[in-house]
C-alpha cells in the first residue's frame, strides 16, 4: 500500500479487478431496452451480409471487359427486386443503389459516366471487375461471429442485432454499486445546513455517474464520524458488487474509513494517487468485494470516479475492457502548473475536429461545483511538464 502515479493506479485497478471478477448473471432484455447494456453472448450472422452482390451506385450493371463501349439496355433492377435472368453479351442492366447485381455482371458504371440514347447506353470509361459492387458475404458470412460477449451495446450493435432478426439480447446484469457518504458535516439535501455543514451532493452526483456508466446505484445513509455506525454501513455496502465511499480517507483525526476497513480485514492496493483533484484516494478489497475510498470534495469525488472507479465498475459489469478515452484539442492560452501530479482541470472545449480549442475554467479548488457546472471537459496536464503554449495540442477528457 502507498501512493502511486496515475498510470500505476489505472494498471492496478484493471489488473486486480480483471483477475478476481466473476461475470454477472445473465438476463434477456428487449432490443428497445438494450442501449448501454453489456452483451453476454456470441452473436453469429444469420445469413451472408450482404446476401447478394449489391450495387453501391445508380447506373448500369455491365461486364467490365465490355467497357468502354456502347451497350443495349436489357432491363432494370431496383432495390427490393431482382432481375429475372442474366446479363447477355453486349448488354447493360439499369440498376439502382442497393439492388442485387444481375448474374454475369461484374461491375456497375455510375450514371454520371454514361450517355443514354433510347435503348442504348454509351459507357464513357473502362471499369475493373467489382467496381461499385459490395460482394456477397464481404461484410460477414453466415454463421460467423459478428458480436462477442463483453461488448457494450450502442446504436451500431443494436442495428446489427435488428438486422439479424433478434428482437432481444442476452446481457449481463447491471453491477450494483453502493454509495456511502461519510462525515458529520454532511446533511441530507432536503435539510437546511448550518454554516459548518454541506448538503449530500456527492452521493447524488455519484449515482448519476454510476447510472450513466451502466451501473445500478444504491444510496446508503450518511455515515457519521463514529466507528460503530460507520462499520455497519460499510458492511451493508460490501453486499453490493462495488462500494464507493465518499470522504473520510484523508489524514484527519475523524477520518475513520481506512481504520474501519482495516478492522474488516481489508487489503489495500493503494492509499493515494498523484493526481489533482483526488490525491487521497483509496482502493482495496474486503470480504471479496472491491471498494474505493473517494475524497470528500465534490470535484475530487467526480474526477476519481471517472478516471479510476468507473473502470472497475465496468469490468465488474462484464465488459471485456474499459479504456479511458481522451480527445485532443489546441490550447487556447498559455498554461502553467506545478510538476509532480497528473492534473484533471475543469475546462471549456469548443470548436470541432482540427479546430477544437480547450481553455481552463477558473476554479477555487476541489470543492467548487459551480466551476464544474460551467465546464464540459477536463484538461489533462502531464506531471513531467510545467508549461504549455497557446496552440499546442493537449489531451482532454470529456465530461
Image: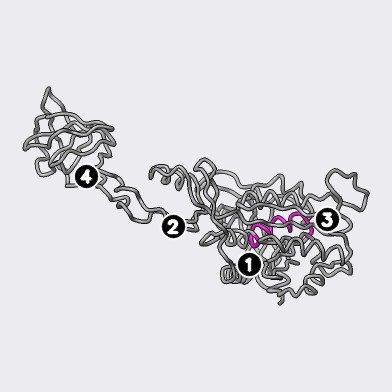
Which type of secondary structure does the marked residue at label 2 adopt?
A: loop
Q: Looking at the picture, how far across and down is residue 147, in whole percent?
A: 42, 54
* Magenta-tinted stretch: 296-309
Q: Looking at the picture, how far across and down is residue 222, in whole percent?
A: 83, 55
Q: Is residue 396 above or below residue 355?
A: below
Distance Cα–Cα, label 3 vs label 4? 66 Å
| Along the viewing direction, whichever of 379 and 162 lies nearer the viewer | 162
**Which residue is denoted by mark 2 in the rendering?**
148
Q: Is residue 345 above or below residue 73?
A: below
> Closer to the observer: label 1 or label 2?
2
**Which residue is denoted by mark 1 in the rendering?**
385
Q: Is residue 72 magenta?
A: no
Dot 2, how many residues are within 10 Å of its Cα: few (below 14), some (14-19), or many (20+)? some
| Along the viewing direction, whichever of 135 and 243 lies nearer the viewer | 243
Count the marks: how many? 4
Q: Residue at x 42, y 46 (%)?
A: 161
**Which residue is denoted by mark 3 in the rendering?**
222
Distance Cα–Cα, label 2 vs label 3? 40 Å
Q: Looking at the picture, how far across and down is residue 211, in whole percent?
A: 65, 49
Q: Looking at the picture, how far across and down is residue 295, in whole percent?
A: 76, 62
The disc, 1 or 2, on the residue closer to the chain's N-terminal end is 2
The disc, 3 or 4, on the residue closer to the chain's N-terminal end is 4
Dot 3, how many residues are within 10 Å of its Cα: few (below 14), some (14-19), or many (20+)? many
Q: Is residue 162 above or below residue 25?
A: above
Which type of secondary structure does the marked residue at label 1 adopt?
A: loop
Amino acid at each position: 500500500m502507498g501512493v502511486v502515479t496515475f498510470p500505476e493506479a489505472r494498471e492496478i485497478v484493471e489488473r486486480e479487478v480483471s483477475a478476481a471478477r466473476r461475470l454477472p448473471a445473465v438476463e434477456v432484455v428487449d432490443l428497445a431496452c438494450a442501449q448501454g447494456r453489456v452483451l453476454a453472448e456470441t452473436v453469429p450472422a444469420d445469413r451472408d451480409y450482404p446476401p447478394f452482390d449489391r450495387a453501391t451506385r445508380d447506373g448500369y450493371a455491365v461486364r467490365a471487359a465490355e467497357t468502354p463501349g456502347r451497350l443495349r439496355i436489357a432491363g432494370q433492377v431496383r432495390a427490393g427486386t431482382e432481375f429475372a435472368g442474366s446479363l447477355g453479351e453486349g448488354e447493360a442492366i439499369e440498376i439502382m443503389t442497393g439492388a442485387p447485381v444481375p448474374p454475369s455482371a461484374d461491375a456497375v458504371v455510375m450514371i454520371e459516366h454514361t450517355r443514354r440514347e433510347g435503348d442504348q447506353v454509351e459507357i464513357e470509361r473502362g471499369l475493373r471487375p467489382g467496381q461499385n459492387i459490395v460482394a456477397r458475404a464481404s461484410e460477414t458470412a453466415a454463421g460467423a461471429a459478428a458480436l462477442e460477449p463483453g461488448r457494450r451495446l450502442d446504436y451500431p450493435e443494436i442495428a446489427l442485432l435488428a438486422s439479424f432478426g433478434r428482437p432481444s439480447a442476452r446481457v449481463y446484469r447491471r453491477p450494483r454499486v453502493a454509495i456511502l457518504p461519510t462525515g458529520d458535516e454532511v446533511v441530507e439535501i432536503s435539510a437546511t445546513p448550518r454554516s459548518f455543514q454541506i448538503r449530500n451532493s456527492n452521493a447524488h452526483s455519484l449515482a448519476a455517474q454510476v447510472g450513466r456508466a451502466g451501473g445500478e446505484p444504491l444510496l446508503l445513509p450518511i455515515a457519521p464520524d463514529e466507528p460503530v455506525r460507520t462499520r455497519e454501513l460499510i458492511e451493508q455496502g460490501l453486499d453490493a458488487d462495488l462500494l464507493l465511499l465518499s470522504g473520510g480517507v484523508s489524514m484527519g483525526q475523524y477520518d475513520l474509513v481506512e481504520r474501519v476497513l482495516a478492522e474488516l480485514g481489508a487489503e489495500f492496493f493503494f492509499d493515494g494517487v498523484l493526481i489533482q483533484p483526488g490525491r487521497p484516494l483509496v482502493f482495496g478489497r474486503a470480504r471479496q468485494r472491491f471498494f474505493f475510498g473517494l475524497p470528500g470534495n465534490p470535484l475530487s469525488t467526480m474526477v476519481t470516479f471517472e478516471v479510476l472507479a468507473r473502470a472497475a465498475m465496468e469490468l465488474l459489469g462484464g465488459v471485456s475492457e474499459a479504456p479511458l478515452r481522451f480527445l485532443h484539442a489546441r490550447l487556447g492560452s498559455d498554461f502553467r502548473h506545478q510538476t509532480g501530479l497528473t492534473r484533471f482541470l475543469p475546462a471549456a472545449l469548443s470548436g470541432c475536429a482540427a479546430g477544437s480549442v480547450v481553455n481552463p475554467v477558473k476554479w477555487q479548488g476541489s470543492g467548487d461545483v459551480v466551476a464544474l457546472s460551467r465546464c464540459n471537459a477536463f484538461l489533462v496536464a502531464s506531471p513531467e511538464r510545467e508549461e504549455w503554449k497557446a496552440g499546442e495540442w493537449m489531451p482532454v477528457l470529456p465530461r
